[in-house]
Image: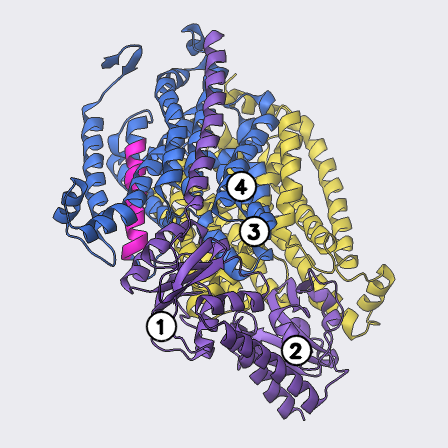
Chain colours: A yellow, B blue, C purple
Amino acid sequence: MTARAVTAARLESRGRRGGRAVGGMLVLLAALLLAVLLSLAVGANPLSPATVWATLRGDGNAETDYIVFDLRIPRTITGILAGAALGVAGALIQAFTRNPLADPGILGVNAGAALAVALGVSFLGLRDVSQFVWLAFLGALVATVAVYLIGSSGRGSADPLRLTLAGVALGAVLSGITTGLALSNPDAFDSMRSWNAGSLLGRGVDTISSVLPFVVLGLVIAVVLAPALNAIALGEDIARAQGANVAGVRIGVVIAVTLLAGSATALAGPISFIGLMVPHVIRWTFGVDQRAILPLSAALAPVVVLTADVLGRVIIAPAEVPVGIVAAFIGAPVLIVLARRRNASAL
Amino acid sequence: MLRCGPLRMPVRPRSIAIGLAAAAALALLGVLSLGLGTYPLAPQDVVRVLLGGGDAMQRTVVIDWRLSRTVAAITIGALLGIAGALFQTVTRNPLASPDILGLSNGAFTGMLLALIVFSGSWPILTAGSVIGGLATSALIWLLSARGGMQGFRLIVVGIGVSAVLASLNTWMLLQIELETAMFASAWGTGSLNGVTAGPLAGALLCALPFVVAAIVLVPRLRQLGLGDDLAASTGVRPPAVRAAALLAGVVLVAAATAVAGPVAFVSLAAPQIARAVARTPHLSLVLSALLGSVLLLGADVVAQHLLPTALPVGVVTLSVGGAYLVLMIILEIRRRA
Amino acid sequence: MPLRVRRRAASLLTGSLCALLLLSGCAAESGASGDAPETAGTHDVEHARGTTAVPNAPQRVVTLEPLELDTAVAVGITPVGAAVASNVAGVPGYLEADGVAAVGTVPEPDLEAIAALEPDLIIGTESRHSALYEQLAAIAPTVFIASQADPWRDNALLIGTALNREDEVAELLSAVDDRCAALADEYAVDGETAQLIRPRDETTLSLYGPVSFSGSLLECAGFTIPEQDWTDGLQADISPENALSAQADHVFITATDVDDESAIPAAITRNAASFPSVTLVDTSYWVSGVGPKGAQAVLDDIESFLEASR
């Protein structure tokens, strides 16, 4: 059977899967709630749940106020936002490129953000991560626009293969410059090695709330595009016959991925492995209907991010392991086990 | 069609032209690389020294100091180009590089572990990197064994293991002191600094049988591109051929890594550039090798002499390789429009 | 089947041969060490790469490590060239050394620039520059310290021996100790605690312990560093959630720009009530400036702090 025939058959069975998807969503939302509670209650400093609850009600002292309100609540919110953005961005990029090696950073988001941060440290003397956020977002946007321009080269269409290659190519250029900057300047190197590890801390609630509209916009575009993505999976000619505007959908995907992945990277650094792993897992469990994959990815990814963050706080207490590092350690084995056991399919 | 015993090689005029152009570029870059530096030599002096003449100072500068590095750039570049062509042909994915078998991340992990545990000198770090790369490939191989070598499974397992190792490397870099981390990172992007003739010769001797193996395997790999059933009917055994090709690629990269560290991007870019420039439907080993050499040698010249501060060559291969690829993409799209 | 077996056996055999060749190639390289007989005007120095004859009065020294640069400048020998930690920062300002040419970076020294300076002595580090030893030794007598992570005073003495100023270095080292003890006597801060903090990133604060370079200077000046779970007595990392475990009577925070108040991490400023005394100090010698001159610079800072808080 060809890949397209398999996909068609799977979409046919989506009616049966629909109930399963709803059930899955409820389970994931419950998991998310649990993850949020853990994120508030657990940390490098062993506060008892009673203390946390008292602090939330306003009865804490200076130390517990700092821990709960300045550290744990902001990082939980960042984790949910960045996670949801990455999960959906990953699902979109995999549907778009049909390449299992694709993660949300492949359109140049991570490379652009990293270069912007390196430039900021090297030439503007920035040291604080909250100063990086907007710079990183800008870098991500500029890089993705550049990738789009290269990949379409005046023809105006966003051919996935070309865009992917352009993303890898431009990503390499930017990455080389970033590494060159980092190796020339110990301050830049120090900042970049921390940046690379990913972190949910240091971004104030103000910053988070100003990035929020971009994430929401990206999610809305993704939801709108989902049915059309299903159609395109059957083949472009069939999709056009069904009335889908292929070129428009592609551009929409690029915009959505840029907004979502750019926001996530600006907020949390390069933790895009989650964006690669979560959609695979969802697809292998719940099928290929994008209208299910997108929301389920949006729910599972924050669970993974928060779990990784919580684990990072406790495994080497009193110090912490950054979230990006833990995320790969828990995500990769899950990915590998599932890839081996199931009748894992290509896209 | 060129015939040489059991080997058959289809030959296209454009490929030959590109190959000759690449060889000419190599010669030019080689002379440049041997001539530039704190003691500059004119090209004719470089040629004279290579042919046996020149005064004592010139001979010291060219042969004792610069020759190993230039030869290393050419040969390591070729090895990486061939390895990249093998990986991309086997997986049929233009984004495939030796890193899907975790080689660069694994080599870096091995080197960092050797650095942290043994705070070792060069031979220990080199051994650590080779062992790290090979162990990682073996692990990925084992974990994806049931899926068949070309499968989706191999790629996904490779991504997973690579991601874990990359995170481990990031973590270790955060733990060690800043200067040591910068040193390790410079090695980790690939550096030809301090390459001497002995280890280079050893690595090349190791790699040679596998280069021969690659040349023998490529026609069979191309047959596999027609579909496994068709290939089997002509007597080619798909899993064996793929496994052998991947093994050859792994050893070539391990040899290159032992000399220069995990040089970024040459394996990925060289075959793609070769294919785009020569407009061949298949990836060509010879052109991939030549372009790999040109890429690495050119990058080394830039990294050493044309930047405001000297940087490891891997930084430039990333940028230059990426820029080439960008140019190819733009030109190819324009041409097809 | 026979072809497959043969190919596998061949690969295995080649693989083992390769490993042998590589290792022997490497071993051969590292086996050749300086073997020159002692001649007039030179003295033998035993170092990480064997024994080398170095000039008794080196005029043109090249150093490849910050500690080596510091020690040389401290005994009055300004090297003609030094590998710097950063091409941007160049030779550290606290050394007040002029005319030192940068010969590349500590991780990647530039051989040709070194040779162009026509040095008569090169000092490097085995754990960083081991691959370059032969090429360096061909340019000038080369001495390697084993590792920059070894106790700095021991390394400084070896460097002093290479420079033929061993006694001077020993004097400088005891001068540091004497000055430290004098500060402890004069300002009598016994019982007061001090903590040196290096902010790493949002999730990590690095605390320096009593065995670290600056930590040991703080302690010999009379302060006590509160007990933590040190790795080798050098350093302990904590999460900002545990910021209060870095609490001390006096807190010193390393920064690149000591006048930039924003370098103080949020974990400290948000818990200001627990951190009454916060002072910014310069990373370039409190952390990176290991050596006799760096130690004096740190003691200068400690003395002016003690004077100001008297």
Q: Position of residue A119 (x, y in %)?
A: 43, 63
Q: Position of residue B258 (x, y in %)?
A: 45, 39
Going from the N terminus, do you reach mark 1 or mark 2 first? 1
Q: Is residue C111 left or right of residue C222?
A: left
In the image as oriented, which residue stretches furthest toward the right? A50
**Mark 3 vs mark 2, CA separation in Å:** 28 Å
Q: CA distance from mark 1 to mark 4?
A: 36 Å
Mark 3 residue type: Ser
Q: Is residue B297 magenta?
A: yes
Q: CA distance from mark 2 to mark 4?
A: 39 Å
The residue depicted at 21 percent of the width and 48 percent of the height is: B59
Residue bearing mark 1 = C100
Chain part drawn in magenta: B289-306
Classify mark 2: residues with Cα within 10 Å, few (<14), some (14-19) or many (20+). Answer: many
For label 3, the residue is B119
Marks 1/2: CA–CA distance: 31 Å
Dot 4 lies on which element? helix
Q: What residue would you read off at disc 4?
A: B128
- Can you say whether B114 is above or below B88 in the image? below
Between the C-alphas of marks 3 and 1, the distance is 29 Å
Secondary element type, mark 3? loop
